[in-house]
Image: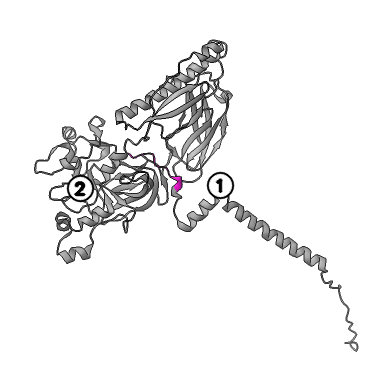
Amino acid sequence: MKRLGFRIRTIYRLRKPRAFEIAKQKMSFLIASLSLIAFVAGNMVGQHGWYAFWKTVLGKENDALIPFVGMVMPIERVPDYGAWSSYGGGSSPDHTFRQVPASVLIPLPTYDPSALHRTSEGAGLLNLVYSIGHMGSYATGQDHSGSHPGVDIRVPVGTPVVSIANGVVETEAMISSGYGHHVVIRHPNVPDPDHAGQTITIYSIYAHLDTILVTQGETVHMGQSIATSGQTGLASGPHLHFQIDRDDAPFHPYWPFNTADMNAARLSFNAAIDSGLNQSQGDKYTVSPLLLVQRFENFKASSVPVITKTTTTTTIASLTNTPLSLSESIAARRALRLAQAQSRSTLRSASRQPAAVVASAAPPSVVSTASTVQTAQVDAIAPVPSGGISSDVDHIRIDHSGTLSRTWQKVKISALDRNGNLVKTPSFSGRIYLITDFGQAEIRPAELSASDFVNGVATVNVLSRGTKTIILATRGAFNTTSAPMVYER
């Protein structure tokens, strides 16, 4: 190279990193790693972190977060088939629920197993609606005359079907055989009817549906629309197959026999049902669905409390364990609301009078259906402003369209007096905080004061975070909940 005139020269000197620089680089990596670990751990131990984490692992909602508040019938109203026939309806499977005149719709009849018995002429409305009883047969329809689990409820296609209680959608399937389109809902924390003080988990099944309105894993509340009835799967006519499985059933929906059992007994499907094949298994793993619903339909506290007024505190004290009938329960709720309104009015009037008058105010007492003994602070209401216009706000109401969408929706909060009339110039102390009692949504603004009400109405904007049903609620100056907002596909 020297002979040819080339010289070796370094372009730049490569400097090896010093010990401090190496440590600094490693420290940056260490800090980044610790930050990532802290971020993941912080999210996991947050308000919903572990819950979300275990949900991804186990694939189920946290049952402890689903309260039991009672049950409702899976179908609210059915046609009076005798009255509907006068309009020419009910004679064809093509006649739908939309075609039923509102004047002939009646509440679902009370299920009475002893009265079920199909005859050639029919046996009244009960047997027209309930075509087959629990563990019944196709031959008579009578309860426990066969091995058909659940109850078949005769309804036209398109009849709204609702969840009987709070729960989680375990299965939603659209198939052309067997149960057809069906929904299975898991209901935790149900009072055990056989063991006082204990709870059980049950599974409600709604089969032969036309449309399904919920998705697997969705949390649903009591009375929420989940589907419409149909004639899918193995069904000779439009009806709802309603069934309740016990938690220990080997599968859901549970059926007491399979093809191998039928072949071993040399019976067809219908003959197996009529003969009561494996009826004992059906009794073991299922319950009479409508009898269970009727048992908890008027679910209430185990005690009958009374409200007494002491200065600014409402104390609810338990007096007796006498159960209430449905009419008594409704009357008790109305009386409770009236007493609360009267007590607030008494306090407002007393706040404008001398202390001696306040002390002489008689404490109202009324029967309530509160489930626990509790103490609640009475809302502080500001005096009526000058000008002669009443500003007494007894409660508030949340109004919305009833549906969810991907865009912001307006929700109205109305200030009402004790008679349900709009208070044009509301005045109250404290603030109203808006939250979601069910589901997830962004609310703007999330809190209101009396100044936010224009002619008695305040408007907030709500944006749903997902496709699950949401229920809005208020806390603070007034506590109330809204009707469900359901996502429309």
Q: In the image, what residue occupies the spot 9% across and 41% down? A: 121
Q: In the image, what residue occupies the spot 50% across and 29% down? A: 376
Q: In the image, what residue occupies the spot 20% across and 58% down? A: 278
Kindly identify which residue carries mark 2: 237
| Amino acid of disc 2 | Gly
- Lower position in the chain sequence, tag 1 or tag 2: 1
Q: Quadrant of residue 77?
A: top left
Give the x, y percent position of residue 256. Answer: 24, 57
Left or right: 69 as drawn, with respect to 11: left
**Depth-wise, is mark 1 or mark 2 nearer the camera?**
1
Is the N terminus in the top left, top right, bottom left or bottom right quadrant?
bottom right
Q: Are marks 1 and 2 in contact (CB under 8 Å)?
A: no
Q: Quadrant of residue 158?
A: top left
Kindly identify which residue carries mark 1: 47
Is residue 27 in view?
A: yes
| Amino acid of disc 1 | Gln
Q: Residues within 10 Å of mark 1 (few under 14, many from 20)?
A: few
Mark 1: secondary structure: loop
Q: Quadrant of residue 90?
A: top left
Q: How is the model colour-coded? A: one colour
Give the x, y percent position of residue 360. Answer: 49, 13
On whether residue 215 falls in the magenta region, the answer is no
Give the x, y percent position of residue 216. Answer: 40, 52
Camera-side residue: 102 or 474? 474
Seen as rendered, the residue at the extreme left is 120
Asked if 8 appears above or below 148 in the picture, the reply is below
Q: Tell me the distance, in whole angstroms, between the alpha carbons under discs 1 and 2.
A: 49 Å
Give the x, y percent position of residue 322. Answer: 32, 31
Residue range of the region highlighted in magenta in the rendering: 64-73
